[in-house]
Amino acid sequence: MTTDHLEVLFADLRADTLPTVQPPGTVAVRQTVRRRRTGRAVLSAAAAVLVIAGGIAVSTGHRSAAPPADATPSVTPSAIPSVAEDPLLKQANVARQALLAGQNGTPAIDAAEPVVGGYRVEHGKYPGKLLLRVACAGSGHFTLTVDAHDPKVEWKKIAQVPVECSDQPVPASTTFTMVASSTIHRMRLADAMDSSGNGGFAYQVTSATGAPLSGEPEPTDSYNPDRRLKLDGREPETEGTARLGRGRPQAGMAPSREEGRYLLLTKCTGTGIATLAVRSGGKDIVTVDTVCASPAGPQTETPGIPVDMMTSVSIRADGADGLLSWALIPS
């Protein structure tokens, strides 16, 4: 057969097959993601057996320069997006830039985080009249609520501001007053189902009068991107931040979670070792020790955590001081 004959045959073959070839669309991409998740789930289940049997924390070594010689990473370093590439963290930074454009004075509280339905973070107190500004990059909407911890009433709502997320964030704002009798203040998201996992938000608290602020800051008050959990595009079912070294740390679980197996993420800023226990039926299912460091310790990821409606989270911080962030992600 001559070269001319081969060229004719290939031309006929292309003419017959090209009309039936379709470029990869959304369905194909989702199928690829499902295959990748399935592969990760198999590795996570195997790692969970080691966690439960050995009673140790498992770390994936996200974005570390090189894994230990005796460790087998569940994914290759090249497959893990960097902090700058994480879409939710990028959107949180976009939202923060929208606030910085109109910033008036150094903020007492400056935070930028992914939007998650269970977001609640404790901040310090700054008695006086304050200005709260919030922006969100992405889609959906939510309400940012400010709660004060009062000795007579455990938590009392003192301010709220509705926020719309968009590609070009427009800050929303409200004024409120912190009183000296409140021991601590908490920011939390309400009505965030439409925007959870679909964007990033930022908020800042400054003086509403222009007078200098004084108060009692918390580790969460200062903007610290290293403290944030690296979600790599994964959406938490529930998450929290616990202040260590200030009496009994607060912990718990959102009541709307679904039963199943979860990936537990922990990260600690400060000193010492924080212990987080997932409990069910009055017993510890899994106990994870997280090393606290500054500006932030290594992120620990423990897969295969069984969760039901009776599951709770308990945090022990004997000798530790700082801030522990945690999240449960459906696996």
Image (cartoon, rainbow, N blue to C red):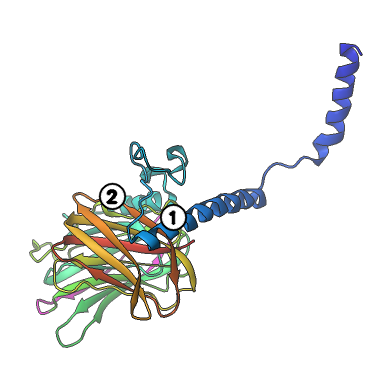
Q: Position of residue 192 (x, y in %)?
A: 42, 70
Q: Position of residue 20 (x, y in %)?
A: 81, 41
- Tag on residue 212? none
User: Between residues 12 and 125, which one lies in front from this camera angle?
Assistant: 12
User: Between residues 311 and 181, which one lies in front from this camera angle?
Assistant: 311
SS class, disc 1: helix
Say which quarter of the image contains residue 218.
bottom left
Q: Position of residue 242 (x, y in %)?
A: 24, 67
Seen in the image, is 125 located left or right of residue 73?
Answer: left
Q: Earlier in the sequence, mark 2 or mark 1?
A: 1
| Residue at image location 45% in from the left, 64% down from the top | 262
What residue sits right under mark 1 in the picture?
47
Residue 148 seen in render: yes
SS class, disc 2: loop
Q: Amino acid at mark 1?
A: Ala
Is residue 300 highlighted in magenta? Answer: no
Q: Residue furthest top?
A: 2
Q: Amino acid at mark 2?
A: Pro
Q: Quadrant of the N terminus?
A: top right
What residue sits right under mark 2 in the picture?
298
> What is the magenta range?
162-181
Residue 194 seen in render: no
| Residue at image location 35% in from the left, 36% down from the top | 66
Seen in the image, is 59 located left or right of residue 315?
Answer: right
Cα gap from disc 2 to disc 1, whole angstroms: 18 Å
Seen in the image, is 263 located left or right of residue 249?
Answer: right
| Residue at image location 8% in from the left, 61% down from the top | 212
